[in-house]
Image (tube, rainbow, N blue to C red):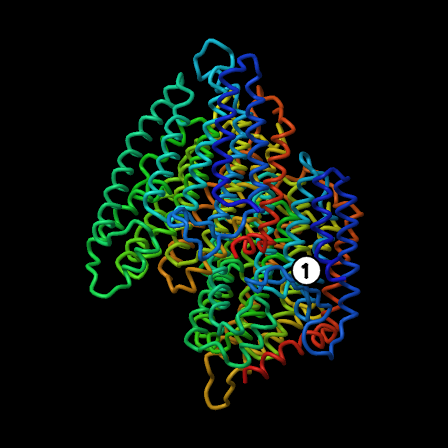
Amino acid sequence: MIPAPYLEVAVIILGTIILLVESFASQLDRRVLGYAALFGLAVIFIATFFVAPQSSTASAPLWTFYSADALSLFFKRIALATTAGVLVMMLDFAPSVSIGVQGATPQAGLGEFFTIPLFTCAGLMWMASAIDFVLIFVSLELVTISFYVLVGFTRRNPASLEAAVKYLVLSALATGFLVYGITWIFGATGETNLQKITTVFSRPGLEHNAALFGGVLVIVALGFKIAAVPFHIWVADVYQGAPTPVTAYLSVGSKAAGFIVLLRVLEPFLILPQMRTLLVAIAVLTLIYGNLAALPQTNVKRLLAYSSIAHAGYLLVAVVSFSGRAVAFYLVAYLLMTLLSFAVLVLVSQGEGDQLENFAGLSQRSPFLAFAMLVAMASLAGVPFTAGFLGKFLVFDAAVSAQHFGLVVVAVITVGAGFYYYFKVVRAIYWDAPPSSADKIIISPLTRFAIIAMIAGTFLLGVYPQPIFDALQ
Amino acid sequence: MLLLVTFAPIVAAVLIMLGLPARTTALAASALTLLTSVLLFFGFDSIAPGFQFVFTIPISTELRLNFALGVDGLSLLMILLGAIVLLAAVWFTGEIEHHENAFYACLLLIAGGAIGAFASLNLFFFYAFHELALIPTFLLIGIWGTGNRRAAAWKVTIYLALGSVILLVGLIMLYRAVPSSARSLDLRVLQAAASAGQIAPAMQSSIYLVLLIGFGTLISLVPFHTWAPEAYASAPAPAAMLHAGVLKKFGLYGLLRLALPLLPDGARHWSGLLLVLLLANIIYIGLVTIAQRRLDWMLGYSSVMHMGYIFLGIASANILGTTGAAILMFAHGLSIALLFAITGEIRKRVPSLDFDAMGGLAKQMPLAAFAFGLGVFAAIGLPGFSNFAAEIMVVFGAFRNGFNYQHFHIFQWAAFLALWGVVISAVYMLRAYRRAFFGSSPEPEVVVADIRSGFRFPIALLVAASILFGFFPQIAVQRIAPAFRNYFTASQ
């Protein structure tokens, strides 16, 4: 049995070792480092199943800000799996990095490219366990700062630099909101620990308004992380400019961590009706904006960026309906289908571009990738027998049982809109003829394995969700 | 057995995508499906109550979700329809120019989805199986369609997706309406809860409305019908056969299976609205059909119009009407499939399906003319075809609802107006038949070949099934009626 905090420590040690090897073994093929990181993450992922349960009476100072309950373990696994998927994509993306980074050696920068995600992963895992505002802040910053580097990694590409600057400025602003909000909450309640804040809240005669103000500021900061409207302005440009694997990482990892923190932070605030109204408003805006803005997109990466806003909307519906189960399942489904679509995008856009035209006739260039993209799009749109559908089913179920019929109506319309833009990709793949110059796409065995695993996972969770529910118990 | 019927087409579709010879595999799978469903149909015990051939796998205890298959007379008849039309559609698929495997796989998936939905006892899978057809329809119309195929494919996909999501909300509301001790997506549990009166009447009427809009969109109930004619006119013939013949019946089946027995108060509350809409389907769409100038559009609209009669049977809410509606679903599926199949063959041979550009085809294509004539007579409801038996039952059923010698109730007027629909459909069907097959061709020099003699088998299959149930509707009635008798005794 392993104590839970060792998991993050192991990830950090793994990252440090790979960084050291990178600096001293200059002759080494850098891709070996990527494989090593992947292997290490796989080992740690297996280790999560042997974590000692947290004893409820533990009084060590650690447990006042660190929780090892089922939910946090679950999200740690999501973080590990996402990082592993992103590393697979990064291995495929390596040639583009070499073009985008200037250096003395052909593989300059590649080592860091494989290592930084490990530190991001540790940050995400800490976020999953954080039950104290101090740890939330520190881990969030670890994630954000490593993303600053990753987004601008291909620094000879102006789009990537632009994305990095936008992300840096707006993210710093969001951090400011977070700190300011925490200060207000601390001032009103005298606590930074979320459980203690809950007890203080239930005390009669407390002045709620100051804490509520702080809570709203924290929601602004988290809204930035999960890409909720109106804190979404950065999303489209940053997603489009960042290296594709980093975009995938941003849209899955950053969002998942944002949602677990949101779930935890909201717990004390849920007794306040104003907070609920605010969240419903944000959810409606996010659903409408994300889906409508995705409709006219012709760049697949940008389309996926708006789709990630739209999915934040569905997740918010589940959050407003207090269904942790729906949030968790939807996030897993979202992880599978988003990583799958980005994995295909990395391969297709290699050396060409990520416009919709580059997908034309993919069914003839590579039936395998075409099918993978079909599954990803069907799942994102919510076609039954895929994980995405079951996620939507749980979200709708939660909303109906919480009597949020207005939200249901909006969500129904936006799901209909979603079919249009996801099927636009399917149309390009299957209806349109391929450009005459296009040749077959080479897929490495590792990527093929990862894609098959994600397709299988999408279908399996679409009809058999029980493993996820069991993991949440 | 039921598992075999449900999964034979789907497994065959997967195998075809993996590279097995397309036509042979598809034919074998659909023949197997038909054979098994015939065995099921005649092996069905019409006296025993409840569902038979039940097969269950638990999926999730937390969601109380199980994968359950089972049939009663109603679902069995629909499965039989699906199997017959599938075999005919696969047989009628001639040479496909490109992606032959994908074409057959899509066809099999549509039929497999429909059959799976009919066989499912769990609402989750009932819904999910139907949606299985969504992407294949999009691809079939978009890739292999004719005319304005891309616009049609978009339209049908968005309409059906939106209708399905509304339906999903309705199903979830239904699931949430029963008290949490009886909450389940299993149809049998819901039936027990409904007959124990556990669904509040106010709740029933709101759920019924949501279900009516959801199912209505899938069935092309006015005013949600505009996708249908365009999609059927553009779809390749086998896809139109399966979609209009089988898949569209899913919505009607859902109304008969869920809305009527589980929400009797809701059905009563909205019966006036439903009558108005279905009369619009019969009279308004009937007149629109007369105005059509192209054979494929005419057929598309006629299939929308005939939905009105089936709705009338459902609205009548008595055993006679609903049993008639069930048989009419079956009969209409056969006749419209035959008509679309022949139209598809004609389309391959003549430059235009415009009535003004057609004529005199009977001389060159006697077999096609004969088969189309049979389809026309069946669609009009000539005695001998099962459409006739079914329409009589529907109209009588509607007439009987709330019948009073002193003054006619709304249902009696509706039945009268619906009878005029028979005249309308005779007008447009016979006129189309005359203009396409008789008279003289405007371009006499065009020589076209008759349809292949090998296609006699699927034609004979469709016609024989229609005539069998036309002369002996009792075979179907004695299997279906017990299902409805349970509903109505439970709700009264």
Tell me if A421 is positioned left or right of B6 in this view. left
State the image coordinates of residue A180 (x, y, percent, origin top left): 23, 42
User: How many numbered marks appear?
Assistant: 1
Is residue A289 shown left or right of residue A31? left
Q: Is residue B296 above or below residue B53?
A: above
Give residue B401's position: percent from left, percent from top: 53, 82
Residue A343 percent location from the top left of the image: 54, 32
Q: Quadrant of the C terminus of chain B?
A: bottom right
The foreground one among B174 and B237 is B174
Asked if residue B424 lies left or right of residue B55, the reply is: left
Residue type indicated by callout 1: Leu
Q: Is residue B279 left or right of residue A199?
A: right
The residue under the point 45% across, 73% down is B204
Outermost bottom residue:
B406
Q: Which residue is mark 1?
A: B334
Residue at (58%, 56%) from the top-left corner? A466
Can residue A108 be seen in the rendering of this structure?
yes
Quarter of the image for the N terminus of chain B: give it.
bottom right
Chain letter for the residue marked with disc 1 in the picture: B
Residue sitting nearer the eye, A195 or B76:
A195
